[in-house]
Amino acid sequence: MHDHSSPFLSALGFNRSDSAISSITPAVYCLDHLAVLTLSGQDASTLLQGQSTCNISEASEKLSLLGSFCSVKGRVISTFLLLKQRDEFQLILPADLAESISKRLKMYVLRADVKIQISPEEIGLFGFADNRVTPYLPANDYQTMVFNDNAAIVKLPSTATPRFIFIGSLDSAQALFEQMGTTDRDFCPALTWKFLDTLAGLPSMTSATSETWIPQSINLDKLGAISFKKGCYTGQEIIARTHYKGKTKASMHHVTLTSNAAITPGLKLFSLDSDSNQSIGEVVNALQTESTWQLLVSVKNKQINAENIFIEGHESDFISWL
């Protein structure tokens, strides 16, 4: 849905490429599946600290954070990437969850000095991959560099070519492309970026999977998205109890599936060898490359590396562990 156009990139003279993976450096990616939620005001930090799993006080103009919002039952509503720019927080999260998360946060504002906006017009977003070492690109994951005074570049985890997210104005984006010497004006579809997220082991929620898992079941503890030293936040009691009592029952893994079937996040996993009909996990991320599916799945720990595991409705196709 989001892959056919990108108003921000189109305004920069880019066209959608028919190629799923680009060999061009830098390769530019449409991120229209994502939205930007901005929070400003004197109480914005306090509000976010009380609602998120990460420690907001650790965010700075030089360091962005991976985090999540959870329900009172400790279930992940959505993950996000948080940037701090001057006196404003910018949260990059799934576009189809932005409105509901905005409404949820506004419930806690009351009389606090907080302004919440979804994808302000002056802010654009795109991804790019570049294997060159340059002074304007951060070197470490989640390291952030201010660009052109009113934009930021964040380095994200990657299994191959280093990749980054740009967030800022149209003028700053144009200045970045000029500095990078970008002459090719084709961008890769958002599905390709989702594919790279999956390879990097970064889970993403959808409206269908929101509030399905506790953070540990999708590896948010291993990804550094949970602070166990900060104060109270929504869902903390269950998340902390799971951590300190060592009772995490499931974890997330990258697997593949050779099948032409339609696989979607939220579908349940079963074992052909199990005596019961109970599910042993769920699909978190699902991206298809030709006839092979790249999947992130949350699976019960006792079933890790087990054989004969299939996805509901597709009993003849078994997942392959990587």
Image (cartoon, rainbow, N blue to C red):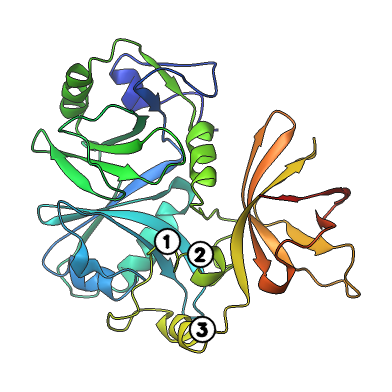
Q: Mark 2 highlights which residue? A: 219
- The answer to whether residue 201 is visible is yes
> What amino acid is found at the position of numbered circle 1 in the picture?
Leu
Disc 1 is placed on an element classified as loop
* Quarter of the rendering occupied by the N terminus: top right
Q: Mark 3 highlights which residue? A: 242
Q: Position of residue 286 (x, y in %)?
A: 63, 45
Callout 1–callout 2 Cβ contact below 8 Å: yes
> What amino acid is found at the position of numbered circle 3 in the picture?
Thr
Q: In this rendering, is residue 172 above or below 249?
A: above
Q: Quadrant of residue 60?
A: bottom left
Disc 2 is placed on an element classified as loop
Q: Quadrant of residue 170?
A: top left
Callout 2–callout 3 Cβ contact below 8 Å: no
From mark 1 to mark 3, how far is it between C-alphas? 16 Å
Q: Earlier in the sequence, mark 1 or mark 3?
A: 1
**Local crowd size for mark 1, using a 10 Å CA cut-off: few (<14), some (14–19), many (≥20):** some
Q: Earlier in the sequence, mark 2 or mark 3?
A: 2
From mark 1 to mark 2, how far is it between C-alphas? 6 Å
Q: Position of residue 18 (x, y in %)?
A: 54, 16
Residue 135 shown left or right of residue 19 in the figure: left
From mark 2 to mark 3, how far is it between C-alphas? 13 Å
Q: In this rendering, is residue 69 above or below 134?
A: below
> What amino acid is found at the position of numbered circle 2 in the picture?
Asn
Q: Mark 1 highlights which residue? A: 223
238, 110: nearer the viewer: 238
Residue 8 shown left or right of residue 58 in the figure: right
- The answer to whether residue 109 is visible is no
